[in-house]
Image (cartoon, helix red, strand yellow):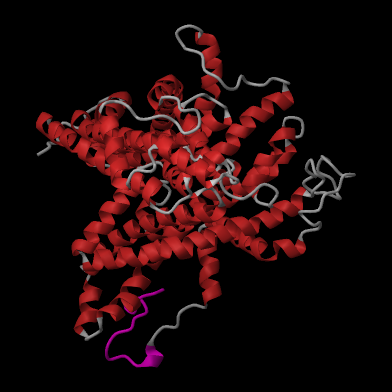
Amino acid sequence: MATLAERGIAPGREAWEYPRERPLLARLGRLAAKNPVGAVALLIVVAFFVLGVIGPYVAPYDPQAFDRYARLQGPSAAHWFGTNSKGQDIFSRVLVGARVSMTFGLVIMFFGFIPGAVLGIISGYAGRWLDYLIQRSSEAWTAFPQLVLVLTFLSAFGPGLRNVSIVIAIGALFGGSRLLRALAIVEKHKEYVAAARSTGATEFRVLWRHVVPNIMPYILVGISSVFAVAVLAEAVLSYLGLGLSPGTPGWGIDLASSLGSAQHYPYLVIFYGGAISIVVLGFNLLGDTLRDILDPRLRGSR
Amino acid sequence: MWRYALRRLSFLPIIVFAVSLLTFVILRVLPGQDPALVIAGQGATKAQISQIHAQLGLDHPIWRQYVNWVGDALRGDFGTTYQSQASIRSEFVRRFPASFEIVFLSLVVSAITGITFGILSAMYRNSVLDYAVRVFAVFGASIPEFFLLTLLIIIPSYLFNYSAPIGGYVSPLHHPWTNLRLFVPPALVLGIGGSAALMRLVRTTMLEVLRSDYIRTAHAKGLSQRAVIIGHALRNAATPIVTALGMAFVAIFGGSIIAEQIMSLQGVGQWFFASTVLRDLPVVQFLAVYTATVVIIVNLIVDLSYAVVDRRVRYN
């Protein structure tokens, strides 16, 4: 996302005089070589997204099928992660569970974070009473332990994944609006905004074509942490029995239903917990790397 | 500072009032499920439901219900639970010590490990210790607490056939050893898990401070490393650390609900959780207001302690 100035674009130069940008892949390769941890994180995240899409098709067994001759078998060649007390293949359930977690993350992003980001930009950019209203509400919301808010809402509307996602999405909405508002306030006083305005661009065009591309990396950092939070929240609330209903494949709910036999067969919980931890780790590391690239002053200090 | 504290304190009742109104709206006014249905079950007749409504005072208009609730609450009466018709206040008093102990122990563990290792890792940057701290800070923030708590129950029982004592509550005054066996393991998990974020922040702040000119001056005039760190660096890093401690408290406060539920500790958090499942609205209403009040007071303490840790801060 090189700016015009970086590409040497200046008045009075012909198009063929501009240095060509390196191809995208080469640029990404250089970035990955400089940030190996970030590259691994990106790989983890992409891998789990792919699993979320293809998981149910590549799963070696039907994750719901009972097999009473294959109960509580440890990890083996036939059942890579072993089987649970109903004889269901844990590897297949972990694969299918990826879809649940990633879908939940996507829902929170599209219905929480992104509307929040839009609100935040408007709020920071336009200011006044709307700004005040959004900011006070989001301060109040983010000050409390999220779990307490979730519990309060769920006792009014009843448990279930849909209600859980509404509450988590509201949290992401406020989180996104705070992040983007702060960014928009910084950006709107910058010279390029004044420059774009002076060319007669409409406010919408200034925002969409100039401000948003400039703060895009920060938005990606935000999305990364929203995914981490969402995956964790779905897992813990399903684990506590407030999200997915028992029996459906999902990392949190499966972990909870393994508890009965886990004292003798600890492998039952390791893979589900491991999957949650690895995904969250991937999103956290990805966010950290993006932040480091954005703010080189902090490099190595986090 | 005292005038500032007084002014902030005078806002407290207003905020608590607003929170109570908001939770009341969420719990009673918005179209949720009728609590009478929850109590009587799905097959309840109309007569049974209206009888329950009359018992619980739900047949009054909604504003009247709220006024009644506030009036009672001001007199220290927070109503009774739907489930057992027990006094919410006495149940709270019974459960409070367990919650206080788990939150307090976790916060102490978190503060000690977070601040100590954060400072050490900044002092010995790029050493083995520093890398260990950084790896821990990332992993600690990623591995969910409920998974760690589950492992805490499972692993000892699998390896040593030993299960940590779970559930109930014994007073630390009467049976200190039993009490600690009950509370220390979950407090360690919550505290050390929660210290990851703190560690990271202390490290970043200290690195920033250690880079500044007055630290070089302090070194140049021949002060010992210890005097530089404690007398100069730490004092200047104190403000963000206090902020982070406040955030750590909120995180642990929320995490203690999960810990109490998993370890079956008879605390306020487990009660909150159980009441959510049972849709026991008066309890949830009370506990939401209680949580809000605690969080607001802690934030107030954090704001006021800036003046204590940094003498340059003046409130007006």
Q: Tell me where the magenta segment starts and ends, as one range.
A: A1-17
What residue appears at the point 51 percent right and 8 percent down from the top-left corner?
Answer: B175
Residue A246 vertical position relative to residue A183 in the rendered view, above or below = above
- Report the front residue among B49 and B208: B49
Q: Outermost residue, front direction? A: B47
Residue A49 place in picture, x, y as percent: 61, 62
Which image quadrant is residue B81 in?
top left
In the rendered image, residue A27 lying in the magenta stretch gets the answer: no
Q: In the image, is residue A253 above or below residue A172?
A: above
Q: Nearer the viewer, residue A270 or A286?
A: A270
Judge from the rendering whether residue B152 lies leftward or rightward of residue B129; answer left or right: right
- The residue located at (31%, 36%) in the rendering is B69
Tell me if B215 is positioned left or right of A298 in this view.
left
Residue A39 in the image: x percent, y percent? 56, 59
Relative horizontal placement of residue B13, taking residue A36 as reference (left or right)? left
Q: Say which of B266 and A184 sits in front.
A: B266
Query: Residue at 41% across / 45% down in the picture?
Result: A149
From what the image shows, is residue A192 above or below residue A38? below
Dominant secondary structure, magenta: loop
Q: Quadrant of the C terminus of chain B?
A: top left
Quadrant showing the N terminus of chain B: top left
Residue A245 visible here: yes
The x, y position of residue A198, in whole percent, is: 19, 83
